[in-house]
Image (cartoon, rainbow, N blue to C red):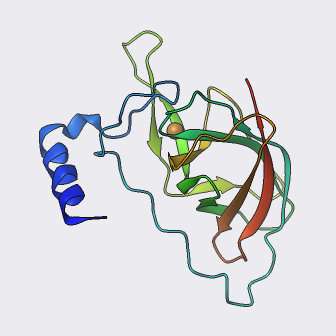
Amino acid sequence: MSRKLISVALTLLIVLPSAQAQHDHAVSAPQVPGMTMPAKPAVNAANNLPAAPVKISGAFVQALPAGTADGSVYLSLTNTGKTALKLIGGASSVSQAVTPMQQTRMTGMAGMTGMKDLPVMIIEAGQTLTLRPGGDHLMLYRMKRVPQVGETVSLTLNFVGYAPLKLKVPVKRL
Ligand SMILES: [Cu+2]
């Protein structure tokens, strides 16, 4: 990040502290860079880490209008291991990072939802975690370009203690 961008981000952080953790994937307006920066993907690719004991199904990237800043990946993750799996994010061919996000509801504000970064998404042993539209998701943080229907997005998911998991994910309209 350039020095100029950093100073802009800092200024916005000071002016708009409440803008953090809320965004709308359907809106193409520029986003306030006050949102929590995603954690850097763990550097473990070169180590002899075992493959994560996880089964992925139904994975897709949501098709979005051109110019949309952030995207979403939905999928089911089944932990076939004996201990909890910790998903801490990842990378994709179309975004700066992949970040676990939690859908939140604001009490007292009918229908208002927001979202916040989850540092860790936990999948308990033997359980399936399903990320569906309207709920928790993996965010394609700051897309370099918006993938189109018919395309396949390369995705890497990082689980604590395991080798990065590589996936090819189709793009679908909701
Ligand atoms: Cu999100």
Image x and y of residue 130, in percent: 75, 40
Q: Give the camera-side residue of 21 and 124.
A: 21
Q: Quadrant of the C terminus?
A: top right
145 left or right of 127? Answer: left
Image x and y of residue 5, in percent: 23, 56
Image x and y of residue 27, in percent: 46, 25
Residue 107 is at least partly visible in this image: yes
Q: Give the camera-side residue of 119 and 4.
A: 4
The answer to whether residue 73 is above or below residue 125 is above
Q: Residue at x 45, y 63 (%)?
A: 39
Q: Residue at x 70, y 58 (%)?
A: 155
75 left or right of 90? Answer: right
Q: Residue at x 81, y 55 (%)?
A: 168
Residue 128 is at least partly visible in this image: no
The answer to whether residue 39 is above or below residue 163 is above
Q: Quadrant of residue 63?
A: top right
Q: Residue furthest top?
A: 110
Q: Give the camera-side residue of 103 and 153.
A: 153
Q: Quadrant of the N terminus?
A: bottom left
Q: Residue at x 77, y 65 (%)?
A: 166
Image x and y of residue 55, in percent: 87, 56
The answer to whether residue 144 is above or below residue 48 is above
Q: Quadrant of residue 14?
A: top left
Q: Quadrant of residue 87?
A: bottom right
- Tally the marks: 0
